[in-house]
Each structure stands twice: as structure tokens, then as C-alpha cells.
Image (tube, rainbow, N blue to C red):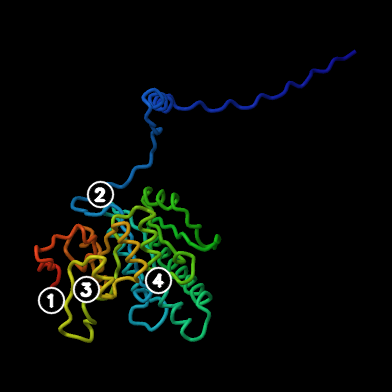
Amino acid sequence: MATTKRNKPKRPPLARLPDPKDLLALGVGAVTGHAVSPPTDDKRIPLAPGVKYRRILLKLSGEALMGDRGYGIDPAVLAGIADEIIDVHNLGVEIALVIGGGNIFRGVAGSTTGMDRSSADAMGMLATVINSLALQDALEARGVKTRVMSAIEIARLAEPYIRRRAIRHLEKGRLVIFAAGTGNPFFTTDTAASLRAMEINADIVMKATRVDGVYDKDPKKFKDARMFRRLSYLDVLTRHLAVMDSTAISLCQDNRLPILVFNMTAPGNIRRVVLGEPLGTLVVDERREIRASNGAAPESEEHAHGK
């Protein structure tokens, strides 16, 4: 009688043993009581000499993208902004961005025409997503890896905003664009910029504008307008200066996060600011200000326009 061979069960493939160096590092950590991470291939880009800030949050207005047009996005302006950002990124600076949507739709303006404010702000948030995707395309066309992270779920177009993931993107040398504001109505993109900057532990919020800094009155209407070089958060709030909205200023004040308002229309200004040149208006914690004995502000705090 013929005998049949029993099929032996196949053994599962052996798991790959961990690297001995990794085991040694973990063992040392267990003995000494200090957590030792295994070696990794990810290295942060080294900073170029003279760079003042490692991680910044750059706030752009939607109007900056439309150039001389009355609506939408000017491709030439978009390309110029992308080149400026990449130039600074090549210095080793980790850059996160928040873009407004005023070139497409502004929620506050929509609410003044009878539209429900929540609905109007939702449309404004979608406008920021459009601008973010446009900037992402311009940056990646130049070879820089970029991630758009949205505060509202729009999975086919952008990643959901997750704080730790955003920080990891920055550490890996990617540019990160935060879209859709805070994801809530009644909050501006200025507030979103302050909030995200604090969440990612940015060194400073840089607000790009079309003027040189913060003035006591509109420099386009008044020739005697004076520009401030240095302000405290309280000065901005009590004088009702057009820096950022009061919620954004209060958030930065509570966390001592400096704000720099500067002119982005001049080519190379972002690079100059990152390298520490005294451009624009710096808003800082007043407790770090050096005041005169009579309580007056130092003379260097305010300068005439053009000096």
C-alpha cells in the first residue's frame, strides 16, 4: 500500500533582527534612566551663518497674490513670492505659512451684505485653501517639498492639520502651508497665524505687508505719517494700530511671541529680516523693553518715515 508524504507546514519567515547599535543605545538608556533614541537618517538642515531665526511663521495676505489685478492670483507675483521663500529656506530656516483669502472672498465683507457670518467665513476659509494650493504648486514646481495642512477636512486636496505631523514636516525640511484658518468662523487668518506659530514653537511671526511697517496713520494718505520701529503689545492694543486683530495680538502677548511687520514688495526683504537686518516694526513683550526713568519710550522706538 502506497504511503503519502504529509505536507509539512511552512515556517513563517524569520523576522529581521534589529541592528545591534540600536539595541545598545536602548540598553544604555534603560541602565542610565535616560531615554536614548535609536539613530536616524533624518538630519535638520544646518543654518547658514548669521541667520537669526530657526523656525518662522510667515503670514501672507491674499491681496498680495493678486498684484495689480483686482481679483484672483497673478502668476508672476506668485512666482516671485515662491522664489523669495525658497531663497530663505535654502538658508536652513524652517518656514510655515498662513495665507489669507481676501483676493477671492473675504468673510467680513460678505457678512456686511446680509450673508450669515458663519457661511461667509466658511467661504473665506475655502478661499485660503485655493491660495494655499496655488502657492504649493509654485513651490513644488521649483523642487521644494511642500505640504498643505487644512483645518477643515478636505482629504483629497490637503492633509488634516495635526500639530506633531506639522512639526515633523518642518524638521524634515519641508515647507508647510496652514490653510482654512483655525477652521472656525469669527476668527481671522491673523489669529490662525498666531495660534499655529505657538503650536509649532515658531521663533517669530512675520507679517508681510505692502508698507514698510506700522505707522501712526495711513502713509499713503498722510505724508507726515511716522513709522514705529519697536512697539509693545499693549501699545498696539491701546492705540488701535493696524498690525493684526486684537485676538491675535493678545495670543502673542500671553505667550511672548514676537511679531514683525515688514514690506514684502521689496525683493530680498524676507532674507534681510531673517539675517537680522532692522527692517519693519517689531512688536515684543514690553517687559523686555528698556524704558527711560520718567516712563517715556526710548527715542529709537519711533522713527520718521524714510529714515
Amino acid at dot 3: Asp
Residue matched to label 4: 100
Q: Amino acid at mark 4?
A: Gly
Point out which mark residue 212 bears.
3
- Tell me how far mark 3 sits from mark 2, CA to CA: 27 Å
Front residue of 307 and 20? 307
Q: Residue furthest top?
A: 1
User: Which residue occupies 38% across, 76% down?
Assistant: 74
- Mark 2 vs mark 4: in front: 4
Q: Is residue 224 left or right of residue 75?
A: left
Closer to the camera: disc 1 or disc 3? Answer: 1
Q: Nearer the viewer, residue 201 or 3?
A: 201
Return the residue at label 1. Answer: 304
Q: Compute the Cα span from label 4 to label 3.
A: 19 Å
Residue 283: x percent and y percent? Answer: 24, 65
* CA distance separating discs 1 and 3: 12 Å
Q: Classify 10 Å Cα crowding around label 2: few (below 14), some (14-19), many (20 and above).
A: some
